[in-house]
Structure formats: structure tokens, C-alpha cells
Amino acid sequence: MMRGFLTGLAVLALGAGAALADPVEGVWQTEVDDGAYAHVTIAPCGAKLCGVMSRSFNAEGEYKAVHLGRKLVWDMVPEGGGKYRDGKIWQPSTDNVYRSKMDMTGDTLKVAGCFGPICKKQNWTRVK
């Protein structure tokens, strides 16, 4: 009887943990920048969200970019409704860091890196 109760409690706890995952968590494909694109894995880092380059591709296919494993996005704060603000984004092709925000609609993530009032934007696509 106690074993069944504990098993049920464990199942409830696992289900609750899964429900707490932010909808943006997962793998996203960037647009091509400087002849290459990447898969970025977005996951919690503390109370905020970060995105790490997990794979890289160019015209020949997948290759090992020197930046694999590096954070491209960090300090993103979920605001609800698919909006994320107050983050930073690093652009490997220029080695610059910008203020960043993201807006998710379905399997599209609109990512912006801003310097002053000017923002460069990309649409990332969720990798299935």
C-alpha cells in the first residue's frame, strides 16, 4: 500500500516538474549568418533562460564550430505570453554582444539584438 502511494507521489512530482518547463525550452535553428547557422539549445540557467550553441552547419553540412558549447543568449526573463526580455545575445560573426529580446509564436522565435534604438532581427525555427 505504501509503495503504491509513493509511486503515485513520484508520478505526480514528475508531472508537475514537466509542467513547469518554459515553452521556449528546446532546440532552435538560427538563420544563416556569415555562411553558417546553428542549433541553439534553450534551457534554464538559474531563474532566467540561456541558449547554448549545440550544433553548427555550413554549406557542406554539419561541422564543429569553435564556438560549440558557448552561450549565444543569456539572462532572458520570461514575461508570459511568449515574450522574453532583458537578455543579452552574442553574434559570433562580429563578436559583439547586444541587448536582446525574444517573442515566441508556435514554432517560430523572433530574436532581436539591439544597440540603442536599432535592432537586428532573426526568426529561429524550432527543431523537431
Image: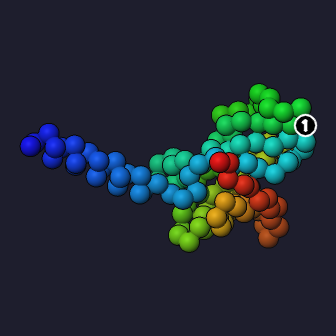
In percent of the image, x 69 and y 40: which residue is there? Answer: 53
Between residues 87 and 106, which one lies in front from this camera angle? 106
Q: Which residue is mark 1?
A: 59
Indicate how the structure is coloured in the image.
rainbow
Q: Secondary structure at mark 1?
A: loop
Question: Mark 1, residues whose alpha carbon is within 10 Å: few (<14), some, or many (≥20)?
Answer: few
Q: Residue at x 10, y 42 (%)?
A: 2
Q: Quadrant of the N terminus?
A: top left
Left or right relative to 125: residue 31: right
**Along the viewing direction, whichever of 128 and 38 lies nearer the viewer:** 128
Q: Position of residue 48 (x, y in %)?
A: 52, 54
- Where's residue 59, x and y in %? 90, 37
**Residue 122 placement (x, y as % from top left):** 79, 59
At 16% from the left edge and 43% from the top edge, which residue is drawn? 4
Instruction: Find residue 66 and report its horizontal and vertical position in percent.
Output: 77, 29
The amino acid type found where label 1 is placed reads: Ala
Give the quarter of the image for residue 39: top right
